[in-house]
Amino acid sequence: MCIFCKIARGEERAYVIYEGEKVVAFLDINPLSKGHTLIVPKDHYENYIEIPLDVSMEIHDAIKRVCEKLKIFNPAGFNIVANVGRKAGQVIMHAHVHVIPRYDREESRPIEFGKSIEVDLDEVYRELTC
Ligand code: AMP
Ligand code: ZN
């Protein structure tokens, strides 16, 4: 079973910040910015375009809820990104959407995958869930 299936079933630890009937959202372990969150369907689909419409509607709802939560960090914007296929940078072959808050202190440029930041995830999680 893949790592995101295990997280969705509660069999692998993750900083879960939102859960719906068919989706779960948790902090990315290699965040590109403070609050970087992944939203994944609980069922296994290989990539974003494989997700059935009813599930993707819940994912869209979760994206909006997660963005609302992340507003406590005062972001200036968000990147909402799905990497589909290895050539496009997809590493985990379980569909997911990245929600990446962007901040005034950063340069205005497209997000670059692979450039993670140092951040205390325990602290980020505490701030988002208390
Ligand atoms: P992608 O390149 O779109 O497949 O992104 C996969 C993301 O999953 C990367 O940003 C990883 O840092 C993240 N990731 C991998 N394993 C875990 C995990 N166990 N918990 C949280 N995030 C993870
Ligand atoms: Zn899976």
Image (tube, helix red, strand yellow):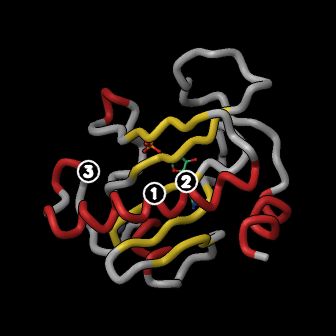
Quarter of the figure with residue 86: top left
97 left or right of 16 in image: left
Mark in the foreground, 1 or 3:
1
Quarter of the figure with residue 32: top right
Q: Quadrant of the N terminus?
A: bottom left
Along the line of sight, the residue nearer the viewer: 18 or 32: 18
The location of residue 81, given as percent across then percent down, is: 41, 39
Whole-Å distance between the Cαs marked 1 and 3? 20 Å
Q: Which residue carries the number 1 mark?
A: 64
Q: Earlier in the sequence, mark 1 or mark 3?
A: 3
Along the line of sight, the residue nearer the viewer: 76 or 120: 76
Q: Quadrant of the C terminus?
A: bottom right
User: Residue placed at 44% from the left, 66% from the top?
Assistant: 4
Q: Which residue carries the number 2 mark?
A: 67
Q: Secondary structure at mark 3?
A: loop
Q: Which residue carries the number 3 mark?
A: 47
Q: Is residue 80 depicted above or below 44 in this figure?
A: above
The location of residue 88, given as percent across then percent down, is: 33, 29
Mark in the foreground, 2 or 3:
2
User: Residue placed at 74% from the left, 55% from the top?
Assistant: 72
Q: Name which residue type carries label 3.
A: Asn
Q: Name which residue type carries label 2.
A: Cys
Asked if the residue at tag 2 contacts the one at tag 1, i.e. Cβ–Cβ closer than 8 Å, the answer is yes
Along the line of sight, the residue nearer the viewer: 1 or 94: 94
Q: Name which residue type carries label 1.
A: Lys
